[in-house]
Image (cartoon, helix red, strand yellow):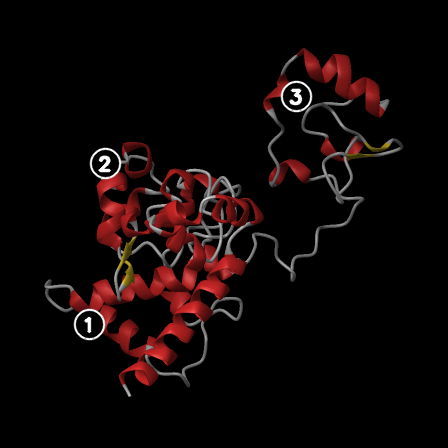
Amino acid sequence: MKLSRKIPVAVLALLALGAGYFLLSPHHRRQLIIDPAIHLTQASTWQRMVAPGELSTPHAFLQNNCAACHTPVRGVEAKNCIPCHADNKALLQRQPTAFHADIGSCVECHREHQGNVPRTTKMDHTALARIGLRHLEKSPAAHDPSRDALVNWLKQPDSPLLQPQLRREESLLNCVSCHRTEDRHNGLFGTDCAQCHGTEKWTLPEFRHPSTSGQSCAQCHQAPPSHYMMHFQMISMTVAGQMHAKVDQCFLCHQTTSWNDIRGVGWYKHH
């Protein structure tokens, strides 16, 4: 009876070893065949058997140290990220990324094991909004009626959306707090980016550029610095064949399809 009880355990162990062997990369399979005793006693070997993929370039040095990021049973926790990233002054002192100081959660937007890529960022505005919503609900400050109304509205699935391009939670976000420096409208359209923009991309499917025969381009478009230097006279006017053009006469050289689509020339690569 004792022997019969041990047999299934032994079989399961062999099956696990077999499955783990095929999960290893070809390089590590060869190493395991050459010297199995050494590799089966190393924790890194067993970690590689269950690794879902390569780490990114910045985290590659942790490839064989799962415990640096993963807590047993719980998974990846923010407290594991803090020892390395809490004092990231380059991140916390920049206006677009300073909000990281109050987030307290990383995995929603920073995902690993996606291969040897230079960055782990995958911006998820919905996840960011949910984190902010949790902060609002737990805030010890006095309740603001307008804020409470917003929180209650977000929890009602039948409420109409304020902006069809946004998800419900994204309506909580204040776009300009992160994208102020990316405003190409120079503040002329106000600070409520969600009036026109969604979170998937900057371009607007509803936008229709004014007529190609229009001559008021400078009302919306500012010429680049090179147009106020000799580059404009020496290169730009010559390429476009407009030797008497002025900097604010965009329509003489440019088309509305793209800045590099020059009238009578086609697509022109400046650099």
Q: Quadrant of residue 78?
A: bottom left
Instruction: Say which mark, if any, is on residue 87.
Output: 2
Q: Residues within 10 Å of mark 3 (few under 14, many from 20)?
A: some
Tell me the amino acid under the disc marked 1.
Pro
- Counting residues from the start of the chain, the first of labels 3 and 2 encountered is 2
Q: Quadrant of residue 91?
A: top left
Tell me the amino acid under the disc marked 2.
Asp
Q: Residue at the location (80% across, 44% down)?
A: 213
Are the two marked residues, 1 and 2, in contact with CB atoms closer than 8 angstroms? no
- Counting residues from the start of the chain, the first of labels 1 and 2 encountered is 2
- Counting residues from the start of the chain, the first of labels 3 and 1 encountered is 1
Residue 110 appears in the figure:
no
Instruction: Say which mark, if any, is on residue 145.
Output: 1
Residue for badge 3:
227
Label 3 vs label 1: CA separation? Answer: 51 Å
Q: Can you give x and y, in whole percent of width and height, for residue 248 in the image?
A: 67, 28
Are the two marked residues, 3 and 1, in contact with CB atoms closer than 8 angstroms? no
Q: Can you give x and y, in whole percent of width and height, for residue 236 in the image?
A: 76, 21
Q: Can you give x and y, in whole percent of width and height, for residue 267 in the image?
A: 81, 34
Q: Residue at the location (76% across, 16% down)?
A: 235
The one nearer the camera, 224 or 67, is 67
Q: Can you give x and y, in whole percent of width and height, for residue 144 in the image?
A: 17, 68
The correct choice, above or below, for 119 with respect to 153 in the image is: above
